[in-house]
Amino acid sequence: MRAKFYPFMLGALVAAGIGTAHAKDKDKDATPPEKQISKELTPSLQAAQKALEEKNYQAILDATAQAEAAKADRTPYENFFIAEMRVQAYVGLNDTPHLIDALESELATGQLPEAEAAKRERTLTQLYYQNKDYPKFLAKSDALIQKGTASPDVYTLRCQASWSLKDWAATDTNCKQAIDTEEKAGKAAQEQVYQMLVDSAIQRKDYSSYVDYMAKLLQHYQKPDYWTDYLAFLPRKAGFNDRLSLDLYRLMSRVGAMRGGNEYLEYADLATRATLPGEAKAALEKGQSQLAGNPTAKQMLAEATKAAAEDQKGIDKQVAEVSKAPTGLPLEKLGEAYASYGNYAKAIELIQKGIDKGGLKNPADAKLHLAVAYLNAGQKDQAEKLFQELSSAPEGVGELAKAWLLYLNQPA
């Protein structure tokens, strides 16, 4: 997944206010010596100030160049004054590269008051980003973070900068920091931030993190493509058991993440193998538009339709028989069959009885089926409670439970 580049749009630069340079003796008396402009520079800098008032920006640059030529051993304040004039000129000319140079020179003089210097540091940081000088931006923004003066948008830009540099480890770190900053403020980060975090995992071939990051993305931005990618990679999570493939297809079908006719065929085949012809029939019917003209699908649908009709005729008679079984597995399986025919009340009853009876090889699977039955029955609260209980279950059950919770708690 590739995030789009959104350049930072620099707002108006508010220049630090500085007084007019005075060269007359009477004014010098009231000005500290270290803040005085020498007579060699006074004419040129007065010309620069006049040009600033007239918004003649090129004249400012010409005058400051003359000032530099007039005296080599300038004081820090004189260098500051020259740099400030140039800052004003380059702002007016909308010349970002030279504005950066002027701001660097100005800050290097150490003449700005602390609060004003902090403003200029933030402006310079933004300009580095705007000029796509990402290494300098990252270094400068890191300094702002250490000082505690970074604005929330800086974290987002650090994510974008490291992604643009293809530094995937830094992208991972910086995007997480941007997300944490926004979420602590009670809101989601920009969608692109989650996208870049996801991309960093793909680039590092860290598929386990990819699944986790897709879950973060879906928590705030739910789109069919995101669901498709998320669920396609879910089985790559460590320990995910293949026996849950049918359960995965159930969720994929529910959220619209099926990628084509072949997946509907696979879904139907898994349901058939699980002796759930009703579910196989429903899967093939749902994928009919993508399976039109497919002879295999046509044959499978005919077989599933016939088997489901036969199954439904005797399903009620099986309840007494499976209730006598030494374990709860037959009860649970029959509950799944009732669910496949839309009888969710009976499905809930039998699956719960199967769980209570015990002897199940994979009791967490049965609870997952029970939670889905509750959801299909319209009992969202009960379903959510069960999914929450299962969210740390092993072998992929917990991952599926968390995925169902994402679906249940879609952003408005």
Image (cartoon, grey):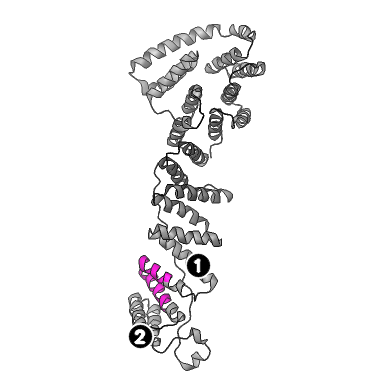
- Does any portion of residue 9 appear in the rendered image? no
Give percent across and percent down for residue 299.
37, 12
Upstream in the sequence, badge 2 or badge 1? 2
Of all residues shown, which one is farthest toward the right? 356
Give percent across and percent down for residue 59.
33, 78
Q: Which residues are magenta?
A: 82-104
On residue 119, which mark appears?
A: 1
- Does any portion of residue 155 appear in the rendered image? yes
Q: Give the structural element (helix, strand or loop) at label 2.
A: helix
Of all residues shown, which one is farthest toward the bottom? 25
On residue 255, which mark appears?
A: none
Disc 2/disc 1 C-alpha distance (Å): 31 Å
On residue 70, which mark appears?
A: 2
Give percent across and percent down for residue 347.
59, 17
- Could you say which quadrant of the image residue 315 lies in? top right
Instruction: Decide which of 29, 394 is in the foreground and name it.
Output: 394
Apparent side of residue 73 relative to residue 31 in the rendered image (left or right): left
Q: Residue at x 37, y 24 (%)?
A: 290
Give percent across and percent down for residue 271.
47, 17
Is the magenta region chiefly helix, strand or loop? helix
Q: Residue at x 49, y 17 (%)?
A: 279
Q: Is residue 122 magenta?
A: no
